[in-house]
Image (tube, rainbow, N blue to C red):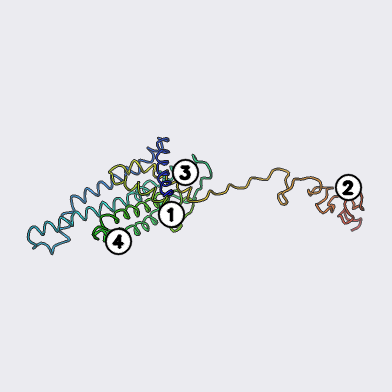
Amino acid sequence: MRDFGGGFGYLLAGQKWVFRHGRWFGFGLLPGLVAFVLYAAALTGLGFGADDLVAWATPFAEDWSSPWLGLFRGFLTALLFCLGLFLAVITFTAVTLLIGEPFYESLSEQVERSEGGNVPESGRSLVQELWISLRDSLRVLGRVLLYGILLFALGFVPLLGQTVIPVIGFCVSGFFLTLELTAVALQRRDVGLDRRLALLRGRRGLALGFGVPLVLAFLVPLVAVFLMPGAVAGATLLARDLLPEEPAPDPEPEPGRDTAYGSEAGPGTAYGPGTAYSSGTAYGSGPAQGPGPGTAPATGFGPPPPGY
């Protein structure tokens, strides 16, 4: 339950971030508006053409008597439109992220800069990023459809289908919505789909706390458009919590410091003329001398004797 509250906290933090940075809020609205217009046009066309599509698909019912023909085709028409609406809800985020890949990538990077720490870069081109996003989105959509078909079938179970199944459906949708949104930041860190799934399964409460309220809000027309920029910002903050912070690079060695042995240059450690190594063996340019104060043993290396 604590993780669930934490996930909702990330969602609120993302919305607050974009409202504090109004320019980025407007910047992030554009892909959502484009996707909304496309989906509105598709659903409008489905609403006007669903009757004809159902009549074309059910020629065997032409001879049915009234009212069975109207009830049967009316039920199928409503079912077709609900299916289209369901597909629109579960694919809206993926399509919006594909349309707005450059927009949301820039937004996510700006969130990370404002929070401090390293801002990783994938080094891939835009075409490569789009291809990876499309491939992963299709894989996620396949999983969502499998769960959707199963939950749809269980929805006909008396009592269970009207109480427990809808709750499970919202949880499944919320989990996969979080998976899609965190992909913006995690893909930049070269975290593949399988590992993203494993990370979110390990923090399932965090994923549900972030995604389920967002799914419920997305059911209201146009709300998804205005919440998308903040959702991407919040998912970026959440992704930073899923992965440990990358260590900062080691600082450059200070001038005059022996990097091999970690000690500063000075008598007994340097390799300069006339100084000794830590063993006391001289590496100077003068002749080797016998034992005495401040001198090295007679094992030193002096210049070669004449005629050598």
Residue 141 as seen in the image, left or right of residue 112: left
Report the residue at 34% width, 50% height from top: 95
Distance between the alpha carbons at the discs numbered 4 and 1: 22 Å
Q: Amino acid at mark 3?
A: Glu
Q: Residue 198's spot in the image, x, y percent?
A: 45, 57
The residue pinned by badge 2 equals 294
The residue pinned by badge 3 equals 109
Q: Are marks 3 and 4 in contact (CB under 8 Å)?
A: no
Along the polypeptide, which appears first: circle 4 or circle 1?
A: 4
Along the polypeptide, which appears first: circle 2 or circle 3?
A: 3
Distance between the alpha carbons at the discs numbered 3 and 4: 38 Å
Q: Residue 200's spot in the image, x, y percent?
A: 43, 54
Along the polypeptide, which appears first: circle 1 or circle 2?
A: 1
Tell me the element at label 2. Answer: loop
Q: Are marks 2 and 3 in contact (CB under 8 Å)?
A: no
Along the polypeptide, which appears first: circle 4 or circle 2?
A: 4
The residue pinned by badge 4 equals 150
Distance between the alpha carbons at the discs numbered 4 and 2: 87 Å
Q: Residue 244's spot in the image, x, y percent?
A: 52, 50
Quadrant location of the C terminus? bottom right
